[in-house]
Amino acid sequence: MKYFALLIFIILFINSCKKEDLGNLNDFFYLRNDGADLPVYVEGNGYSKKFVIVIHGGPGGDAQIYNNFSKAFSKTLEDNFAMVYYDQRGSGTSVGKFNGDLLNVNQHVEDLEKLITLLKSKYGSSINIFLFGHSWGGTLGTAFLIKGNNQDKISGWIEVDGAHNFACNKEVYYALKNISLQQIYSSSYSKEWSEIYSYCNKLDTTIAFADTTISRLNKFGFEVEKYLNTDGLIISDTPLEISSLLNHLYTSGYSPITAKINLRITSIKMFNEVKNLNYSDQLYKIKIPTLFVWGKHDYVIPIKIGYDGINKIGSTDKKMLVLEKSGHSSMFNQMKPFLTEVVGFISSHN
Amino acid sequence: MKLRILIPLLFIFSTVLSQTEKLTKTTYKDTSQIDKLSARISYYGINTFHAGLKIGVEYPIKRKIIEKPRIPRKYGLKVIHKEWIASINLTGYYHKNNHTGFWLNPELSRRRTGRRGGFKEFSYGIGFLKTFQPKTYIVNDDGSVDKVFMPGHGFFTISLGIAYGKDYSVKKNKPLCWYIKPNYYLIFPYNTLFNMGFGFEVGITYKFLSNPFLKK
């Protein structure tokens, strides 16, 4: 018994003395805030002192898709920086018990503020933090940056096909109408394009769209990527590795059923708030270095929103990259130019 | 003369009648009280691959033995067993980078065992799941950070499972069963509402005493 206790003590002592490998961070923990436990993965090169927080899409999506889903994508970023993948409340594999009223933008912003405080507490106050917001992450990142002095904590902002103007359904309508008219006669999916065109044609643009119309247009925005991919207007320059996909689904911390249910519930609960969100007029407040990356064939958040946003950003250090053969997830469509630009942007800013 | 014909006819008719009587459906209630308890142990995988171990005991609270004719009737009777089984199960599993869970899940199952011992079962359970999470931090309003002691959550659960297996005590008098059992479960309250999960179970059941179905 005496030896057993000694052995336990030695194991605990060695474990406590184990130094974290900063060069190859592989940390996992939860952040608890207002009833929600948000899973946080910190992976990659901690020596860089550059921590990139991935703000996932949705509302209700998950961050693991940017990590495990394609290792070709995450590895390049992790070789250069420490990547922080966190699931927002009510999203991905986040857990907890909280009132549905706490599913709102302000609460999400507060969660993000606390995550940044936690990261600085764990890895040192000298680390540089970058935000990388995709789709709905563009809304949340913008909401965070325009609040108070939050920008002071951030070294750079990367918005990818982001929804700083979530209420852009009229732009979605025009973009879908134009592309469907263009594709009707040349696409192998001419029947589907005809349906989209006739649906758009019936809409009355002089009045605000009904919720069902907004949802339908959003659905079309995702659906057309399949047709555009077949027609060669959207490509995937880096094939998906089956092993990454299997790992993502079955052996990682991800849970497909939980993520699906969270997405469904959170997107429904937040719909009324986000459908009218438009931060375009407050983008002038953003003064930090900013990179916008947009897919030319994004029909969920059309490229016009990107151009409008980058023009209104208050920073003098700003750039927009348009990927000609990409859709709403441009980082997975044209991964190579995407990564070159993003790595270059983060590397050149402190 | 008439009697000479009538008596053999009556004999044949009565024989046929008795044969028909024998081939109608009959139900017996099993009232044996002693040899019912079984124990089971199984692999339990959350999302199939996040490994866990499930142990449990089961006790049939109601048993019926049904004899009914096979079709075509020349094959005689088949015997099937129908049971309502109460069980209590404890599952422990580890979901890497997510949580470790301990799940107490009493179940009520309806099992139908065929004449060769193959069975299928529908299980309905209610239970309680206690999870333990990895490192969890709280950031206070003043910016200080605290580490949560023994972080985790408790949830109520409702589960539904379908099992397929074989009971070797029916034909071979061996006190063993194997089974596979996919099941879905609902966890609540979870975030703002509920959550669902999928578990895959493969296990064996050991019957402590001889098979009560075997006619003694």
Image (cartoon, helix red, strand yellow):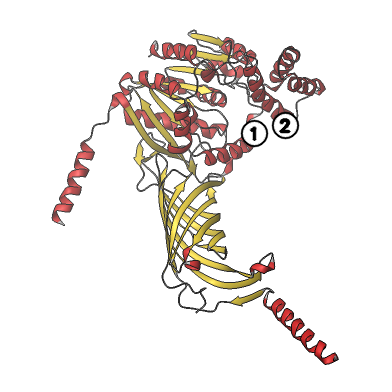
Residue B92, position in %: x, y? 40, 53
Label 2 sits on what residue type?
Asp
Tell me which chain the residue with mark 1 is part of.
A
Q: Contact, CB < 8 Å: mark 2 with mark 1?
A: yes
Tell me which chain the residue with mark 2 is part of.
A
* Secondary structure state at the residue bearing disc 2: helix
Label 1 sits on what residue type?
Phe
Quadrant location of the N terminus of chain A in the rendered image: bottom left
Q: Nearer the viewer, residue B87 or B34?
A: B34
Residue A303 in which image quadrant: top right
Quadrant location of the C terminus of chain A in the rendered image: top left
Visible in this render: residue A124? Answer: no
Residue under pointer 2: A211
Q: Nearer the viewer, residue A202 or B198?
A: B198
Visible in this render: residue A213? Answer: yes
User: With respect to residue A310, does A329 lie above or below?
Assistant: below
Question: Mark 2 Cα within 10 Å, few/some/many (few <14, many 20+)?
Answer: few
Residue under pointer 1: A271
- Horizontal side, residue B134 vs residue B70: left or right: left
Residue A186, position in %: x, y? 72, 12
The residue that appears at 38% across and 37% down in the rendered structure is A29
